[in-house]
Amino acid sequence: AAVLSARGLTKAYHATRALSDLSLDIRAGESVAVMGPSGGGKTTLLHCLAGIITPDTGQVLLRHDDGGTTDVARLSDRDRSALRRSTFGFVFQQGLLIPELTALENVAVALMLLGVDRSSAEHSAAGWLAALGLAGLEDRRVGQLSGGQAQRVAIARAQVSGASVIFADEPTGALDSGTSADVMDLLLRSTTGTGKTLVVVTHDDGIARRCARTVRLRDGRIVSDSLQAESAA
Ligand code: ADP
Ligand code: ADP
């Protein structure tokens, strides 16, 4: 069954149609690579699915564990914000981490925003950082980490709250190819097989091949949607 269903999404910026009557079902536990040319609507789709922007028309149905559904596009700002903090996790190319805070603080704050006390939050954060190979770097400021290390902190931050859907927008776009492969490996390992759903916007065929499914957008429409014969993840 679909955990997220986009139904008839349309989004325009002035005269530019970013999404054009787009529908897509994403199944729970699936890893989906969203590809296609620049300007095709990939980021707009991701932002609509994640409740970061509201489509002009259409629905984004999120199915809950109890079978109920919520239209992400029609929630109040407050409920949408709560959803982004608890159910969704984000790994973007940059901008989600606070460079002046330590790795541990950056991850712990995601839990503290949910009302978890600092010591429990830091305990969980340390566990995630260790799982991502960052043990020993907890107290390093994120601004002083390498790009690959910082993206691993971002992965930890995205997951520490127990998010069930992880949205990644060119998560390795700023990294060299070796580091990029390592970061993607950790992202896929920490999501696939755990029941979590991963939606990743990428230009990298290597990344797409490791996802179970590739959706290609052009001019705000889906032009192909294929399952990998065998996902390497
Ligand atoms: P992609 O991620 O595939 O590169 P985007 O979703 O970023 O595509 O953009 C789709 C189209 O919408 C492009 O033509 C882009 O210029 C336009 N667009 C995206 N965001 C904005 C914005 N905030 N204001 C104006 N135009 C935008
Ligand atoms: P609020 O509306 O309370 O300010 P936030 O904007 O902090 O809520 O959203 C909560 C979470 O959603 C953030 O911690 C972040 O991970 C994610 N998020 C929200 N907006 C964006 C955005 N524009 N880009 C990336 N992530 C976002």
Image: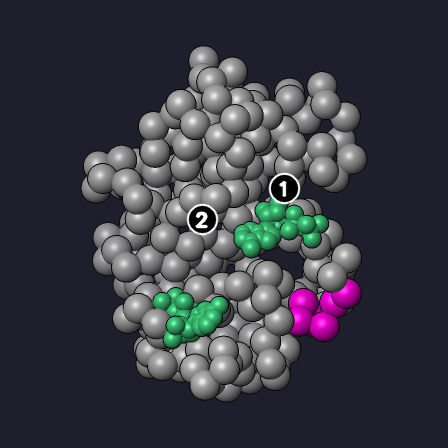
Does the closest atom of ligand 2 sit within 8 Å of the Cβ of label 1?
A: no
Label disc, if present, on residue 107 of the rendered structure: none
Q: Nearer the viewer, residue 101 or 184?
A: 101
Residue 85 screen position, x and y as percent = 67, 47
Name the residue: 30% across, 44% down.
Answer: 174
**As shown in the figure, which amino acid type bears the numbered disc 1?**
Gly
Question: Is residue 173 within the magenta segment?
Answer: no
On the picture, is 185 further left or further right than 53? Answer: left
Residue 3 screen position, x and y as percent = 60, 64
Does the closest atom of ligand 2 sit within 8 Å of the Cβ of label 2?
A: yes
On the picture, is 127 further left or further right than 224? Answer: right
**As shown in the figure, which amino acid type bears the numbered disc 2?**
Phe
Quickly name the residue at label 1.
162
Q: Is residue 86 above or below residue 186?
A: below
Name the residue: 76% across, 31% down.
Answer: 116
Q: Is residue 136 above or below residue 43?
A: above
Q: Residues within 10 Å of mark 2 (few under 14, many from 20)?
A: many
Q: Which residues are magenta?
A: 71-76
Quickly name the residue at label 2.
92
Residue 89 screen position, x and y as percent = 57, 48
Q: Pick out the residue farthest to the front.
A: 14
Residue 153 shows up from this direction: yes
Residue 166 screen position, x and y as percent = 52, 51
